[in-house]
Every structure is written in C-alpha cells, then in structure tokens.
Amino acid sequence: MNIEKKSIPANEDEIVLYTYLGEALWKIQMVEQALSCLITLKLNPDANMEEADAFLNKLQSYTLGKAITESKDKKLFEDSFQEELFCFLDKRNWLVHKSLAEVQHEIDYFNKRKGIIKTLCNRIKDITDNAENIKRKIEYEMIEFCESQNRDMSRMREILKLQESGMRIYKV
C-alpha cells in the first residue's frame, strides 16, 4: 500500500518560527567553527597550514560539547568563559533536543499556539544573540592569541569593528 501524505504548508507564525530556528542553528554552527579554529590555533601554534588543516578537520567532527570539553581539559580559556560556553551548550541542547517536546506536551496547544510560538521565538532569539556574542569573544581571543605569536592582526581588528557597527563582511 502506497500512502503518500501531502505536506501542509506552514502558516505565517510557523514561517517566522522556522526562520528563527534556521538563524539560531546557523549561528550555533558559526560558534562551533570558531571554537574549532581557536582550539587548533592554541594547540598548534607552530603548525604549518597543512598540519593545522588536518587538525582542524579532526576537530570539526566533534560535537559542540566535545569541543568545549576539549578546551576545558586543555585549559585553553579562563574559567568564566569556559562556564559561559557550557551554559551556551545547555541552551543549544535545549533547542536541538527538547524544544519540540516541550511544545508537544502543552495540553491546550491549539488555543495557545500564537503565544507558544512567540515565547519560543523569544527564547530562540536569545540563543542566537548568545551565539553571536560568544563567536565575537572567540574571534577576539583568536586575534589576541595571534598577536601574542607576533602576527599583525590590525586588519582583522578593523574588520571586526566594521561588523560590530552593522556592516556585513563576507570575504576578507
């Protein structure tokens, strides 16, 4: 028996929710990427490009939790930032693993749908903002580390300042 179910199009509220979800997941991946790059830099300060890329490729298969734990085990960050990373991981895990289950357990979902979606969007936006802040801290940490290795990072600092002012920079 062939049962083909036709997809029901998303309504406006759902489209907004899905947009927030997509942005949050994208920004979370940006944190994961930045964290992997910083760990690579700090653990391989004298590596050539090929060696660093090989190490980075290995790290990119790590989950966010594993990368954060690796950074803690190697004492790569101050305790306060390490704690911030673990707090962010909890938020990320809620989004990826528990957010839908919370909504499904709402007994009166049909009548409260608009409010539930608004609450979800606010919570997801908080995660997105948190991801942006953490990524920025990681970027500055990378710059400071490279400067400590006698590399000129003035252009990168300039680019970060432009991004902080609202300008999108796609390629350096």
Image (tube, rainbow, N blue to C red):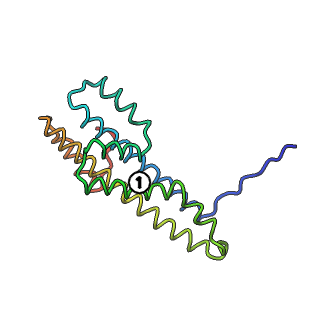
Q: Which residue is nearer to you in this view: 171 or 79?
A: 79
Q: Residue furthest right?
A: 1
Q: Measured from the top left, where is residue 73 in percent x and y?
A: 30, 43
Q: Is residue 24 left or right of residue 149?
A: right
Q: Quadrant of the N terminus?
A: top right
Q: Residue at x 11, y 35 (%)?
A: 150
Q: Measured from the top left, where is residue 126 in percent x and y?
A: 41, 63
Q: Is residue 24 above or below residue 12?
A: above
Q: Is residue 70 above or below residue 131?
A: above
Circle 1 is placed at which residue position? 89
Q: Measured from the top left, where is residue 23 in percent x and y?
A: 46, 54
Q: Residue at x 67, y 57 (%)?
A: 9
Q: Measured from the top left, where is residue 4 in percent x and y?
A: 80, 47
Q: Secondary structure at mark 1?
A: helix
For the residue carrying disc 1, how many other residues have a C-alpha within 10 Å: few (<14), some (14-19), or many (20+)?
some
For residue 83, which quarter of the picture? bottom left
